[in-house]
Amino acid sequence: MTEMKKTSPAETGEITVEELADLPAGSYLLCDIRDDISFTYGTIPGAVSHPGILREGAEGRLPADKKLVLFCMHGTQSLPLAENLRDMGFDACSLTGGYGLWLKKQLVHEDRSAEIEESLRSKRKFKQRLFTPFVRAIQQYELLKPGDKVAVCISGGKDSMLMAKLFQELKRHRKFEFELVFLVMDPGYNELNRTLIENNAETLGVPIEIFETRIFDAVDQIEKSPCYLCARMRRGYLYNKAKSMGCNKIALGHHFDDVIETTLMGMLWGGQMQGMMPKLHSQNFPGMELIRPMYLIREDDIKAWRDANHLHFIQCACHFTDTCSSCRDDGSPISKRMETKMLIRKLKQTNPYVEANIFNSLSNVSVDTLIAYKQNGKVHHFLETYE
């Protein structure tokens, strides 16, 4: 085995973003130790995913002739892991402040909306992959009507930010008149996430309106199903704010992958067959409707658009997943959605049509083969009509 380079006693164990930029190209390996899903949401250019880096080091699968620069979201776990690797004999250090601080240093206040909009109009780029299925979903599911006033709800992630740009592009075509409001609810974001949302809106040319709530504080102490409660509270606040602004619809950025993941999650973890509808009437806010115009857009195409335009968005900004699963001191597992996402990815390796098959199953239901089903809240059993 190649002799590994020993670290100097003077090593601090950390390296700043500025010091990283001064390292000679090819002399180091940038290691993202967060989970695979966090990595796919966004990472530092040139980084390699290494969620199991200690195991790789113990098995001799890490380069011994390069400096290993580790990072997580905020540096809470990369620092001790780098120390462990140094104990193994590797030249390892942690990126100060992690991915979060790197993101903050990338913020540039400039309007790049023209070039980003051009990428959505170009057939060679993303028109067919993003704008076309966006329009198709609106037409196929009748999501927009003349005179609608839509609150485009922006969480700060890649999906809702792209949805805002697609709505702006649709508005430019002026097939019929409708109004848009770009609504951001701050449920208690930390400073970095709030700044990143505002900066991205400026970069994309999206005129957002922000209103504040303290939802994160309200669900912080909830042990059972905090995410479910948080989601319901957020939607309620969005409906209420949108209605007060004269809107009759709110638009959410759920995409094709969200639809099939929700379907599979219901079967595997909830013991039910339930889809995610492209539109819903609000039960608590009469006259209000929820629409999902990204319903037919693939997540991989959203990521490709993000990366092609060198954009960086927040993954999840709540108190529970503000870091990443590998950064949680309590060792809590990844979410069921992430677990389901990885399962579908694994199934796709042997069945390239698995995603389309799950989606198509939602409209190919044979009621005659079901033991029971619900309709308008009432359960119907097959014995009712069986002779």
Image: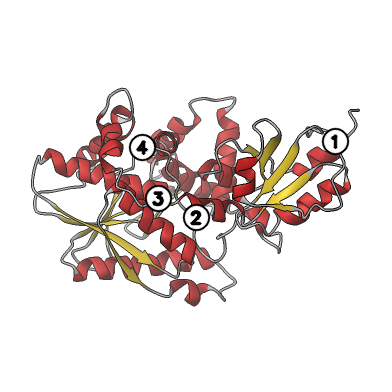
- Do labels 4 and 3 touch, CB within 8 Å? no
**In front: 78, or 360?**
78
Task: Looking at the image, tell me whether mark 4 or mark 3 is earlier in sequence order.
Answer: 3
**In front: 26, or 132?**
26
Q: CA distance from mark 4 to mark 3?
A: 29 Å
What secondary structure is marked by label 4? Answer: loop
Q: In this orientation, does residue 19 appear? A: yes
Q: Whole-percent x and y of residue 234?
A: 38, 66
Q: Which residue is mark 4?
A: 297
Q: Which residue is mark 1?
A: 59
Label 2 amino acid? Lys
Label 4 amino acid? Ile
- Which residue is rendered at x = 30% and y = 32% of the image? 119
Q: Whole-percent x and y of residue 314?
A: 47, 53
Q: Which residue is mark 2?
A: 104
Task: Looking at the image, tell me whether mark 2 or mark 1 is earlier in sequence order.
Answer: 1
**In front: 175, or 347?**
175
Residue 238 drawn above or below residue 302:
below
What secondary structure is marked by label 1? Answer: loop
Q: Nearer the viewer, mark 2 or mark 1?
A: 2
What secondary structure is marked by label 2? Answer: helix
**359 with respect to 251 (left or right):** right
